Image (cartoon, helix red, strand yellow):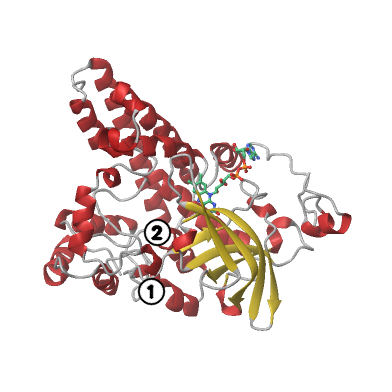
Amino acid sequence: MADVESPTAEVEAFVDTNWTLDLTLRAWWDRLAAAGFAFPTWPEGLGGRSWSAGRAREVGAALAAAGVVGPPAGVGQNLGGPTLVAHGTHEQQRALVPPLASGAEGWCQLFSEPGAGSDLAGLQTRAVRDGDEWIVNGQKVWNSSAHIADRGLLLARTDSSVPKHEGISYFVIDMDQPGVETRPLVQMNGEAEFCEVFLTDARIPADRLIGGLGDGWSVTQTTLAVERAGVASSGARGLVSGVPGRLGGMLDRTVGEVLDRAARSRRRAISGFVIDNRSFRQLAEAAGRSRDPIVRQQLASFRTSTDINRYSGLRARASAAAGNRPGPESSTGKLAMSDIAKASRDLAFTLLGADGMLADEDAPAAGAYHLVALASFGAGMGGGTDEIQRNVIGERALGLPKEPQVDRGVPFDQLRVGTQRRDDEGESNP
Ligand SMILES: Cc1cc2nc3c(=O)[nH]c(=O)nc-3n(C[C@H](O)[C@H](O)[C@H](O)COP(=O)(O)OP(=O)(O)OC[C@H]3O[C@@H](n4cnc5c(N)ncnc54)[C@H](O)[C@@H]3O)c2cc1C
């Protein structure tokens, strides 16, 4: 559909007709998706309208201005939807995308393994074809929200006789089955947002293979580029959302309750990896330091960094919406966000002063600043570490020589870390 005029008036009319505080979140999200306002860049009938990223942002801004609850936000919505829109068959899109658009389902990303994080292509989880199904065995780790996920985006090795990047396939797996065991991991900030997942003869119907057999690595590039861009941009501004999926526990709450809880939760306002500029201004005022020239300079510097990164993110998304392949912006933006997270942590503790030594309910904002400060380290790891982003920028943007790779062109089962050789020779991983 051509981008002729601003969608704001249409969104306002939609809100006038459809929004009431006693609607359940499920019903509101259904309406947003049916109108194509949930994910406007996705195709019509799948929760969107095939609109440009710019127009989608206007929809988000109009929803935020109307004070309504925004579309569902989760791993499936952020990563699964865009990946399926790019690589799924028509049938896969019709079956899998609508429940994401309406928030009926929450998904997780089952990529990393104990021996395969930065070297993701070294993954050892295996999928073996059995009639109309695939049988999966292996272990994943650091899987955000896996304990409340309905489905997972899974990478598994389907051919060990070819070099490591060529034998990987990309699946969507149902989490609610006997072969999937999910164990939450408690982080140093006391939260348990991600899990380890054990797959023991778990089953996947054959039609849940996304992209071709052995083409998983190219599908993965889409997911990773979307993920980096998402971390780099740190999400939409001013829109309250909710946790999608049955196990998220929010679908049957009224939207009034969702807004109410968000307004009351000081912790929720200050969350993620980075503290927002408004909270910093309030914190400086509360500490009586908003006129301190050094503090003002630090606040201005922080604001400048976040604004520059936001504009870079907008440029990257506009380029992607124009059909260009993801460029180095997703890596530079993610690196910048990692620096911003550290700056946010340091600025928070500067402003908190001695209160920075308090935690939980005793601390300002019920300890929310601490949670963000302790989570800040994750910004440089999740979605690919800072070092890996630097490698990507060096090799793909600057044309520097590639890192030495001893495993290039070597069949996976001939590598020392390959399970077959390890099993055959009774060796442990070097
Ligand atoms: C908050 C958070 C959420 C996450 N969510 C998910 C999720 O939902 N799903 C999922 O599958 N995974 C998830 N992860 C895992 C994440 O993708 C990995 O942590 C990341 O890819 C790094 O892998 P690793 O932890 O195994 O570290 P390693 O790969 O073991 O790296 C260890 C160190 O070595 C460095 N290093 C490794 N290789 C190189 C190299 N070639 N050159 C230079 N330095 C190198 C790294 O930069 C790092 O400092 C999450 C992680 C975090 C922190």
Q: Is residue 249 above or below residue 134?
A: above
Residue at left 58%, top 36%? Answer: 387
Q: Nearer the viewer, residue 49 or 141?
A: 141
Residue at which label 1 appears: 98
Residue 350 in percent (x, y) is at: 33, 22
Residue 18 in percent (x, y) is at: 16, 71
In terms of sequence position, does the residue under pointer 2 or pointer 1 come before the other? Answer: 2
Q: For mark 1, does the 10 Å Cα neighbourhood hold few (<14), some (14 to 19), or many (20 or more) residues? A: many
Q: Nearer the viewer, residue 334 or 2?
A: 334
428 horizontally vs 380: left or right: right
Three-letter amino acid code at the position of disc 2: Gly
Residue at left 17%, top 60%? Answer: 8
Q: Nearer the viewer, residue 295 or 136?
A: 136
The quadrant in which the N terminus is found is bottom left
- Residue 63 visible in the snapshot: yes
Secondary structure beneath label 2 = loop
382 horizontally vs 258: left or right: right
Residue at which label 2 appears: 74
Residue 272 in percent (x, y) is at: 37, 44
- Residue 5 visible in the snapshot: no
Q: Nearer the viewer, residue 281 or 256?
A: 256
Q: Is residue 206 above or below residue 233?
A: below
Based on the displayed image, in which of its 4 quarters is residue 163 positioned? bottom right
Label placed on residue 342: none
The quadrant in which the C terminus is found is top right
Q: Quadrant of ligand 1?
A: top right
**Label 1 near ligand 1 (CB < 8 Å):** no
Three-letter amino acid code at the position of disc 1: Pro
204 horizontally vs 42: left or right: right
Residue at left 81%, top 50%? Answer: 416
Secondary structure beneath label 1 = helix
CA–CA distance in space, label 2 to label 1: 14 Å
